[in-house]
Amino acid sequence: MMARYNLRHNPSDNLDRRGVIEILENINGICDGEVMYKGTVNFDYRAGGKLVGVGVIDFGAVSVSSCYFYYDTSHEVMKRSLGTFSILKEIEYCALNGYKFYYLGYYISKCKAMSYKGRFLPHELLVGGEWQEQVVQNMHI
């Protein structure tokens, strides 16, 4: 699934199995088979038993950070808005397990692949070196 996802987003890449493993090891904080950071897990999302998406999540003492999300790029799966679904499930996980903060990860409002993150309110953005609470959707920051 990761190879198909990467090919959709990076058409010039044609990863072999080793290339896919290297990407997944880097995303999951693994180096030469040793785990560098023990606070990273994958949230697997399945439909009808089939793996359709994976969220890579870092855990801190009081926070959860969504590092990366990749998914099956088939038309049937893409119409499901899995990125949004994963955020909702991760927020639910935070609430059920007493985490104080949830970080959506890197956000570029004008980037279509990231703009959906701005719909989750309220949230804070680092603007001009200061954290500013956003209570309405602002697509031009």
Image (spheres, rainbow, N blue to C red):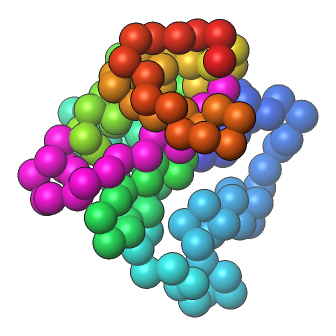
Which residue is pictured at 43% across the width and 29% down the height? 133
Q: In this view, does 59 lie above or below 125?
A: below
Which residue is pictured at 68% across the width and 42% down the height? 129
Task: Tell me if I can see residue 76 in this picture.
Answer: no
* Picture coordinates of residue 7, whole percent (x, y): 74, 34
Q: Is residue 133 above or below residue 130?
A: above
The picture quadrant where one finds residue 107 is top right
Left or right of residue 100, residue 66 in this image = right
Left or right of residue 102, residue 17 in this image = right
Q: In which quarter of the image is the N terminus?
A: top right
Q: Quadrant of the C terminus?
A: top right
Which residue is pictured at 66% across the width and 66% down the height? 26
* Picture coordinates of residue 27, whole percent (x, y): 60, 61
Which residue is pictured at 56% across the width and 18% down the height? 115
Q: Which of 73 and 81 is in front in this view?
A: 81
* Magenta region includes residue 93: yes
* Picture coordinates of residue 79, whole percent (x, y): 41, 12
Q: Give the range drawn in magenta.
A: 92-108
